[in-house]
Amino acid sequence: MAIIEINDVSKTYPNGCSALDSICLSIEEGQFVAIIGPSGSGKTTLIRLMNGLEPATKGCVVVDNLKVCKHHLRKIRSRVGMVFQHFNLVDQLNVMTNVLSGRLSRRHWLPSMLYLFHKTDYAAATEALRRVELLGKAWTRADKLSGGQQQRAGVARALAQEPKMILADEPVASLDPVIGRGIIKLLKEISERDGITVVANLHQVKMVRQFADRVIGLHNGRIVFDGSPSRLDDAALHRIYYGVTNENDLNGNKDQHLAVAYP
């Protein structure tokens, strides 16, 4: 069953920049989907369209049978957890409170503003911290954590929300390879164990091949690849990153290009 339906969607920004061009995409429940492509290919815009952070210029986005529009934004965002590249934690608050903020969409606006939570919220946050192995840091200020710990706290915040889907926008871009692999492995485990759909923008092709169920390749705002990681060969990567279908089209710069395309 599809949890995301993107029907003929285009996005053009006010400055005239075309980020996405006639995207059609259906994502099934429980899939771990990696979106790859060069900078400026439309990856972040596509993620932001899925939870209404950006409106589509043309076409329709449907998440969990709800059209992404102002009328449905609160419901959609209560079902969609976000993991960000730069963590988006409140440094002055402890880890527990940051994780509890994932429950705010379930509360009336007044208790939310005052950071008032129920026992069920604390139970959900505690379990989320246990899952990401951060329970011992629950009452530590967020700015005292390492980068990897902060991102695990970000994953715990998304888990505490009890979402149907997690969107991750380059979640390991600011982490070293070993720590980054641990974060992607964690997201994969969440997808498999909880049946939560994970859609992640990634640059690390090796991680994509190891953990993704499905790969979407973007180039210049268009989908140029959609398939399993086993089909992500050199020809597919050339098409995704450089818009070419033949190694000879790299015009003698093969080594330079491959260093970028195969992180």
Image (spheres, grey):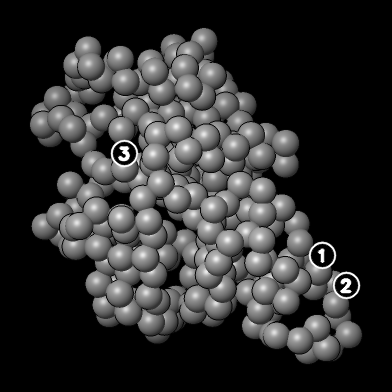
Q: Which numbered disc covers residue 3?
A: none
Query: Front-most of 211 and 203?
Result: 211
Give the answer, above or below, for where 72 lies relative to 119: below
Q: Position of residue 221 (x, y in %)?
A: 48, 77
Mark 2 in CB contact with mark 1 (< 8 angstroms)? yes
Give the answer, above or below, for where 2 lies relative to 253: above
Q: Nearer the viewer, mark 3 or mark 1?
A: 3
- Whether residue 13 is visible: no
Residue corresponding to mark 2: 255
Name the amino acid, label 2: Asp
Residue corresponding to mark 3: 163
Query: Front-most of 199 and 173?
Result: 199
Q: Position of residue 251 (x, y in %)?
A: 84, 88
What SS does tag 1 mark?
Answer: helix
Residue, x 55% and y 66% (percent of image)? 227
Q: Which numbered disc covers residue 259?
A: 1
